[in-house]
Amino acid sequence: MEAGEIPANYLTHLNVAFGYITPDFRITNMDGVSPDVYERVGDIKARNPNLKLLIALGGWKFSDPGPWQSVFPAMVSTAANRAVFIKNALRFLENFGYDGLDFDWEYPGADDRGGTEKDGENYAMLFKELRAAIKASGRDYIVTFTAPTSYWYLRHFDLEDMVPHVDWVNLMSYDLHGVWDGNNTIGKQVLAHTNLTEIDLSLDLFWRVGVQPSKIVLGLGFYGRSFSLKDPRCWKPGCAFSGPGDAGPCSGTAGILSFREITDVLRRTGATAFWDKKAAVKYLPYGKNSWISFDDAQTIQAKIDYANQLGLSGLMIWAVDLDNGQLDALRTISNPSIISNDDTPFELVDVRNIFPTEYLPPNGYTPKYGLVNFGGSLGSTNMDPSKGGFGFFLISGDSHVASPLIKRDNEPDPFEFLDCHGTKVALQSGISKARVACFSDDVEGCFRVMEQGIESTLVELPDHCFSQQYARAVSIQISHDQYIPKRFGDRQPTSAVFDFYFDFNMGLVRRDTNNTSIRIDYSNVKGYWNSVVNSPGIQSQDLTRRFFAPSPVDWQKKYSSGGYSTFEDSKSFDISDDVQAPLLWQTAQDCPVDGSTFDEGIGAYIKGKLNAHFLYGFSMVASLDQGAFHIQESNGFLHVSGNTNFTYAVGGIGSLSISEAGKGNPAISDEIPVTLGGHAINAGNSADMATFEPFYQVQYGIATMNGTDIRSFGEDAVPFNGRLQTRILSDFGDSTLYFPISNAESDMSLAKRSKNNIVISKSDVLYNGLGNGGRIALSSIVTFGLKSRLLLGGQNIPLPIDLPNMSVSYNTMTEFTFSSEKEQELSCADYAVTTLAYQFQNNTKLARWNGDDLAEFAYDSQLLKDEKKCYNETDHSSLGGRGKLYGWGYSGGNSIDISTFLQDQNILNMFDNIQARFGCDSCVSCETDQKKRKKGKEDFCCGCKMETGFQVTSRGASRKSMKKKSN
């Protein structure tokens, strides 16, 4: 996560982790991080002026053996050293606009972490002297430190002398367990890395020395700790582990997965995690032998309830950049409408320049907007939308959508509740009553809730009176009781006292706002902001200052004017994926062959490299009128370049019927898209949110058909005996696809791609026993896309809106056709390779994207006639031998695996570690299946010369397309 992506409006405090301390006690950047990050990260305060920014010093790696390990002990060891550090630290805070310091020394006094005996005492002195220096400076800097839950490390903290001089303590109530347990008395057993029971016990260590709950901030981990199970059948806490779980594709560290990666695992597997209610943690066995524990919305809420019950000071997250692009974990904890009480003034552009005249918001209304920046030439310090990728979401419109009854900066003071505790007494039909009055000179602003009529208006309640955040206003009328409680002192009301009636029936809240205008832009292209957002628009009759347009053609001209190069390119969005996809490995036992029995089996896989450069853009102008959402304009584009270099292989002996896998024929695998970042953007301090999910997806397919006649359909059980594979370098081209799709998009010249480069393996072989022949097709479907969604009204009265989704797919298929040419005693194979590229759109009704939802833009078909291979069946007799299977050379009774037929140890490892996409018990049967024998004929001998009297009944089949629309 870069500085421009930090969701500042969800946070009250942000610790920038980590800063390091030099041997001469100056604050510096940590290894591998540019100093610019620390100097410019404060720019995010512009998006939440109330945000407090702290620099966190230290971290686990800082105290690893190496050049930094001795710095903390040396810095605190003498008064002189502490004074030098304090002077340098205060200068750092002043120079870069930070609000405080967080100390993360892991751990003072611990001899296994470079600690010394006097660390605890000296550490306490540092806080005492630092607090005195802050007071003398006349500033009000925040000082905190991070503490472990483990007594082993906490015993060296002099809590009684430390805590009085800090604002709070950040409790690391995570990482309670991990693979390190294998080196201590706990041993190699899988245990959750967070556990509410253990957290409660650890807090007793603080209570014993007089630390007040209000000084403790409870830590939550937006990640999980993973293990490799020693025995996958034993997966409950306490079972043995053999090592850490595999590293995630983003986190890149064995034994840990980010919340983003965990949600991807859940989506990919469709699994349901186990909930340990007492420990308030989820755990999940997945894959072949993996296990992970983590927090989700349910367990986080349990920890929040626990913290509230104890009266803890708040919650701390490690770390906000481990959340997914939709901020699912963070939104469980925080709400920008509560955290941030005022909106940043909108000064990026004049709203008249981003909306057509007919959709301009009324004068006098302050737009609410959100902006994130990512990628671009400035890397992690980018805060300028013109310098890289960005997401922009703006709402401007009438104020009576939701009326806040909470005092906010720059807004009229609402009426005040005179007897807020009395509202718990419900009247008829669940309606509650409270007495209210205005104490502000702006009486009209006080009763803004009455604007456009009060009934069914959504109101935001003051949290000191109510546990619920929102309610539905029912009515308001003069009260018979005009008494003002004594707690208001000398304050005099400026209005009469009213009875305010309300309930919590959110289903009846009205959505009758008029003239609310919405603008959305999202792109990872450097230059999109200036080219599309910050550029002249096309009005119905004339040009105006910013870009919007009444027709898709106008948008496409803007996107493509002067060629695609009008948008500056960036290498920040390259995709590189090592694809390893076992498709199928299935065996059939005890198959009769020439008087003996053998196990048979067939396996198939696709593996190789995916390299792509993926760019996208989407813009929308919409309105909300009388509760109805209307998209006025929406357009976008996708641009893909790069290639796949995949090997498609099948090998073995048996009869293969892919329809037995229960996924049809062709069978297409279910694959979860890989999210490429993605963002959730709130409009200012509102709960209105736009989410964007760029993604790519690789799906796999298998088709089988008995017989070689492509014009007829019949059985799909294919007799096969051999090994066939192709390696295909398939080019994505260098084309830009525009949305909505127009008829003009079905233009094969758009592809700008090279023809497939195909290599046939020299190790291919076919043995006899192919019956009437057959066809096996293997395919890969590579899709790139952008999904967008809008949530208006927040979580209380949500109005979810699925915006148009755009995608482009490349379907590459290799088809092996094989048969026995009996007269020549040959087994022959033909190879055909096809690539079909198409763009697809869905969720288009609101956007009125009419016309076809799918358009082809590239087609490449090659029948490799010159590559036809034939094998003399009698030449392979030497590979048999008495008691061995003809051709393959293994004995009856021997166990077989995929490497028996594909002869590659790496392939065996792939099948051992990755679950096959198509699993079934009956996909592969013996080539000597009784159903395939004709009465009165001698038994067919799999691996022997074909008997002329044996025929497999088949009507043949014609080729089936393996094209799949993206979802």
Image: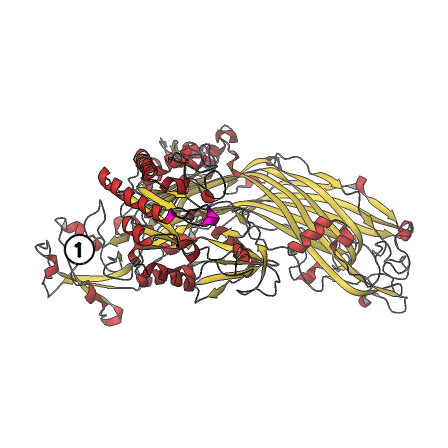
Q: Is residue 317 above or below residue 471?
A: above
Quick one: SS at disc 1? loop
- The residue under the point 27% across, 60% down is 471
Image x and y of residue 611, in percent:
60, 39
Q: Is residue 147 above or below residue 351?
A: below
Is 112 contained in the magenta span? yes
Q: Residue furthest front?
A: 117
Image x and y of residue 876, in percent:
89, 51
Q: Amino acid at mark 1?
A: Phe
Quadrant showing the N terminus: top left
Q: Quadrant of residue 793?
A: bottom left
Q: Quadrant of residue 756?
A: top right
Q: Can see residue 540? A: no
Please identify the dominant SS of the magenta region.
loop
- The residue under the point 80% across, 52% down is 722
Is 517 situated left or right of 917 in this image? left
Image x and y of residue 772, in percent:
83, 56
Q: Residue furthest bottom?
A: 428
Number of marks drawn: 1
Q: Is residue 577 above or below residue 471?
A: above
Please give the range of residues in magenta: 105-119
Q: Is residue 28 above or below residue 693?
A: above
Mark 1 highlights which residue? Answer: 415
Is 583 contained in the magenta span? no
Q: Residue furthest top?
A: 562
Q: Are there few (<14), some (14-19), or many (20+) residues within 10 Å of tag 1?
A: many
Q: Quadrant of residue 220?
A: bottom left
Is 603 situated left or right of 528 in this image? right
- The residue under the point 58% across, 62% down is 240
Q: Can see residue 910? A: yes
Image x and y of residue 738, in percent:
51, 39
